[in-house]
Image (spheres, rainbow, N blue to C red):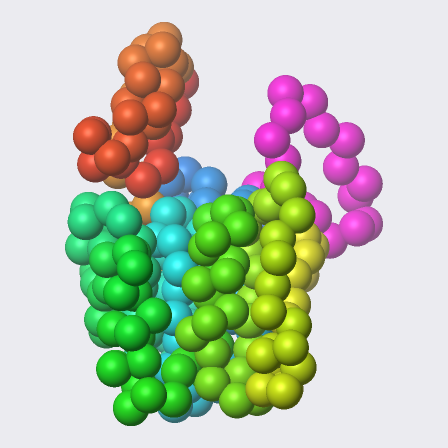
Amino acid sequence: MIDGTLAEQVRVPFADGSLHHLPEHVTDEQAVFLSDSLPTGYEVGVLAGQVRPGDTVAVVGAGAVGLAAILTTSLWGASKVIAIDTNEFRLEKALEFGATDTVVSGPNAREEVLAMTDGLGVDVAMECVGYPETLQLTASLVRTRGHIANLGVHGKPVELPLDTMWIGNYTLTMGLVDGTSTATLLKMVASGKLPSDKMGTHTFKLDDIEQAWEVFANSAREKALKVILKA
């Protein structure tokens, strides 16, 4: 298995730590998400956001990366994990992945989260979508001295309330996954502590790739998270 490869051909230096041996009992469906979704959710979300035992966490966006973040908050003992999304199916999946509460994203989302946290906000808020409005919502959910972890890929500038963030002593982190957690996550998957294969909701033969893309392009209608192609 190789960290984060999304090309037809990849050069892998032998000694850079990107190559991992898969135990025989780890299936392809379990392993495939160790190359992207799980490390991103864990490294850029849970680790960078400094989730700690007993923390309350909000995850804005319950796609594959958001679900990976929700799943791996358990490794650091978060006590409450609130999933926020517009898609009811993804919110149902979020509960399966370890979320304790769900909120349908909309004009009252912030008020609902505050009501769940005695008006204080969350310790760690993670943005897993990549839109200006979702990052702005994420920043509004954090309590004083809280952490904002940006996992979403943003294609345009975002205006943030730095005056409020400054006085609240917030920490904002972002960046690319570097794969340093893959070996740890692989052990968790191999031991059954991280059911990574739950992210794959549909499986197709390689010959049916057009149908697979059609399902993935209409993920809300098809109730799809990730589509797996097999030879």
Report which quarter residue 150 is drawn in.
bottom right
Q: Nearer the viewer, residue 6 or 152?
A: 152
Q: Residue at x 53, y 51 (%)?
A: 132
Q: Residue at x 38, y 54 (%)?
A: 61
Q: Residue at x 45, y 55 (%)?
A: 134
Q: Nearer the viewer, residue 5 or 130?
A: 130
- Is residue 106 shown above or below 148? above
Report which quarter residue 105 is drawn in.
bottom left
Q: Is residue 215 visible?
A: yes
Which percent across, then down, holds residue 177? 64, 54
Residue 169 magenta-highlighted? no
Query: Can you say which quadrant of the picture contains the N terminus?
Result: top right
Q: Residue at x 59, y 69 (%)?
A: 161
Q: Is residue 63 left or right of residue 44?
A: left
Which percent across, then down, holds residue 97? 28, 61
Give the residues in magenta.
1-19
Which percent across, then down, holds residue 191? 38, 65
Q: Is residue 76 left or right of residue 90?
A: right
Which percent across, then down, holds residue 98? 27, 68
Report which quarter residue 194 is drawn in.
bottom left
